Amino acid sequence: MTTRTSGGPGPVPEAAGPDPGTTTAPGAEIAEPPASQATGAVPRNASADRAAVRAFRPRRVIPSVITALLMTALGLLVALEVVSALLNRPLRLVPYDRILPWASSTPWSDPRVMAGAGLTGLLGLLLVLLAIVPGRPTLVPVRTGTRKLLVGVQRRGFARSLARAAEAVPGVDRARVRLLGRTVRVRADAGTRDVTDLGDVVREAVNARIDAFSPVRRHSVRVRLRGR
């Protein structure tokens, strides 16, 4: 579990005392939800929920830096060439004198021109999208009811806890959980061939564990059972 407080420098270990079965070392994963996160004990606060989602939204720092540097370098190059040409002292950092004869005699409809323009546009769009679109989240924001305390649970620990909840259902030998966005996919192996109504029981158990964590965003549960 990772906790952020407003005005703090970043993630810090949770200050509260450890709950039974919960590790409190910095960066450690938790196996069970804290008792304070029980559904109904945490008031719904839209402002706090939005703050938690923003705080734990993954950011693509490296693509953003690369895109910013490339756009800055290109803009600076164009500015230097234009200003130097206006002052009748062209820098000629770009050998456009060599390209000018070819560009003057080549129509826009030429396949090479269209291919080059399309490739350049696609590369630029790709860099911008990599910089803007958030990366894969590593934490699940949970509700605290206040903007002053932002808590996130590691996705791997969250999935393991949900798998344990499914395995606690009588008749389930083993369960595996994958998080795909806000969808929880449960694959469970049953100890018997008759799995009638067992999927509903597993779904209820997993939903109950999700409610115990009280995540900011609701997760849908899909169960796939395999009998012997």
Image: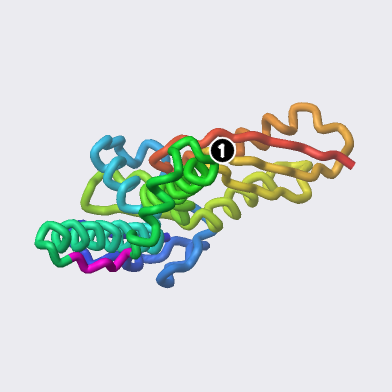
Q: Categorize mark 1 by other alpha carbons within 10 Å: few (<14), some (14-19), many (20+).
A: few
Residue nearest the observer in this picture, 116 or 95? 95
Q: Is residue 85 left or right of residue 109?
A: left
Image color mode: rainbow
Residue drawn at the location 75% of the way across and 27% of the way down = 197
- Figure quadrant of residue 99: bottom left
How many numbered markers are drawn?
Answer: 1
| Residue with the most extreme bottom position | 25
Overall secondary structure of the magenta stretch?
A: loop
Residue nearest the observer in this picture, 42 or 112? 112
Pointer 1: what residue?
183
Residue drawn at the location 31% of the way across and 41% of the way down = 49
Q: Looking at the picture, which amino acid does disc 1 mark?
A: Thr
Query: Residue 166: x percent and y percent?
Result: 66, 44
Q: Quadrant of the C terminus?
A: top right
| Residue with the most extreme left position | 87
Query: Residue 69: x percent and y percent?
Result: 31, 63
Residue 207 located within the stretch drawn in magenta: no
Residue nearest the observer in this picture, 100 or 58? 100
Vertical arrangement, residue 106 with respect to residue 204, above or below: below
Q: Is residue 100 left or right of residue 115?
A: left
Vertical arrangement, residue 190 with respect to residue 127, above or below: above
Residue 91 located within the stretch drawn in magenta: yes
**Residue 209 appears in the picture as rendered:** no
Secondary structure beneath dot 1 equals strand
Residue drawn at the location 81% of the way across and 42% of the way down = 190
Query: Residue 26: x percent and y percent?
Result: 40, 71
Residues shaded magenta? 90-94
Q: Is residue 138 left or right of residue 67?
A: right
Q: Quadrant of the N terminus?
A: bottom left
Query: Residue 126: x percent and y percent?
Result: 45, 49
